[in-house]
Image (cartoon, rainbow, N blue to C red):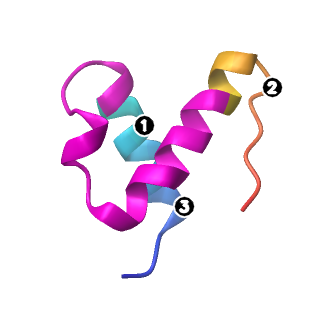
Amino acid sequence: MKVKQYMVTVYAVLVKNGKRQIEELPEAYIVPVAEYLATQEEGTGTFTE
C-alpha cells in the first residue's frame, strides 16, 4: 500500500481528536502518522518524508 501524505494528515486529525486509535489504522500508516503527530507536538509544524 502506498502512503499518501494527505491521508497521513487525515488519520492524524482523527487520532488526535480521539475518533480513531493509532493501532486501528492501516499498518502502512501507523509509523508516518505517529511521526506526524510527534512533529506537531514539538511545535515545528513540518513533516518530511
Whether label 3 touches label 1, CB < 8 Å: no
**Compared to 8, does 21 lie above or below?**
above
Distance (Cα) linking label 3 and label 2: 17 Å
Identify the secondary structure beneath mark 3. Answer: helix
Residue at 53% from the left image edge and 53% from the top image edge = 32
Q: Position of residue 34 (x, y in %)?
A: 51, 40
Q: Is residue 9 above or below residue 3?
A: above
Write down the residue under mark 1.
12
Which residues, given as a range, are shown in magenta?
15-38
User: Label 3, label 1: how many angstroms apart (C-alpha)?
Assistant: 11 Å
Element class at badge 1: helix
Is the N terminus in the top left, top right, bottom left or bottom right quadrant?
A: bottom left
* Residue 7 in the image, given as x and y percentages of width and height: 41, 56
Hey, which quadrant is residue 36 in on the image?
top right
Position of 35 compared to 42: left or right? left
Tell me the quadrant of the picture where the C terminus can be found: bottom right
Question: Which residue corresponds to mark 3?
Answer: 5
Q: What kind of secondary structure does the magenta stretch mostly adopt?
A: helix
Residue 22 counted in the magenta span: yes
